[in-house]
Image: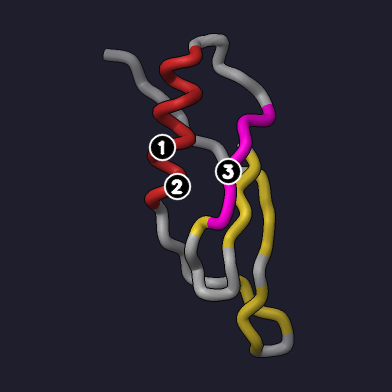
Amino acid sequence: MKICITARGAVESVEIIESTGFARLDNDALDIAREYRFRPATRNGKAVPVCLPYSINYRIR
């Protein structure tokens, strides 16, 4: 997935780049990622927004 994070560390948007093939798993991953909070990226000591690839790995037991 691609996740975009604001300069305050909040998730601004998430997007599935490569599906698991299971809509429920994809939707759950999106829901989980939307609740994350991050330490903001910085450039020259200043917090900046950033978009980056991000993976959530499922383990089926």
Q: Position of residue 52 (x, y in %)?
A: 67, 51
Q: Position of residue 9 (x, y in %)?
A: 50, 68
Give the answer, above or below, for where 17 lies relative to 54: above
Label 1: few (<14), some or many (≥20) within 10 Å? few
Give the answer, above or below, for where 61 lies relative to 53: above
- Residue contact between numbered discs 2 and 1, judged by CB atoms under 8 Å: yes
Label 2: few (<14), some or many (≥20) within 10 Å? some
Give the answer, above or below, for where 34 lies relative to 46: above
Q: Earlier in the sequence, mark 3 or mark 2?
A: 3
Q: Could you give the CA–CA distance between mark 3 and mark 2, rounded to whole angstroms?
A: 7 Å
Find numbered disc 3 in the image and state the secondary structure of the residue it sits on.
strand
Residue depicted at x 61% and y 81%: 47
Disc 2 residue type?
Arg
Q: Which residue is mark 2?
A: 34
Report if residue 13 lies within the magenta region. Answer: yes
Disc 3 residue type?
Val
Q: Position of residue 37 (x, y in %)?
A: 42, 61
Q: Which residue is mark 1?
A: 31
Find numbered disc 1 in the image and state the secondary structure of the residue it sits on.
helix
Q: Could you give the CA–CA distance between mark 3 and mark 1, rounded to whole angstroms?
A: 9 Å
Query: Which disc, if any, is residue 14?
Result: 3
Q: Quadrant of residue 51?
A: bottom right
Stretch in magenta: 12-17
Residue depicted at x 60% and y 48%: 3
**Residue most extreme to the top:** 21
Query: Which disc, if any, is residue 53?
Result: none
Residue depicted at x 51% and y 56%: 11
- Residue contact between numbered discs 3 and 2, judged by CB atoms under 8 Å: yes
Q: Could you give the CA–CA distance between mark 2 and mark 1, rounded to whole angstroms?
A: 5 Å
Which quarter of the rendered picture does the C terminus lie within?
A: top left
Which quarter of the rendered picture does the N terminus lie within?
A: top right
Label 3: few (<14), some or many (≥20) within 10 Å? many
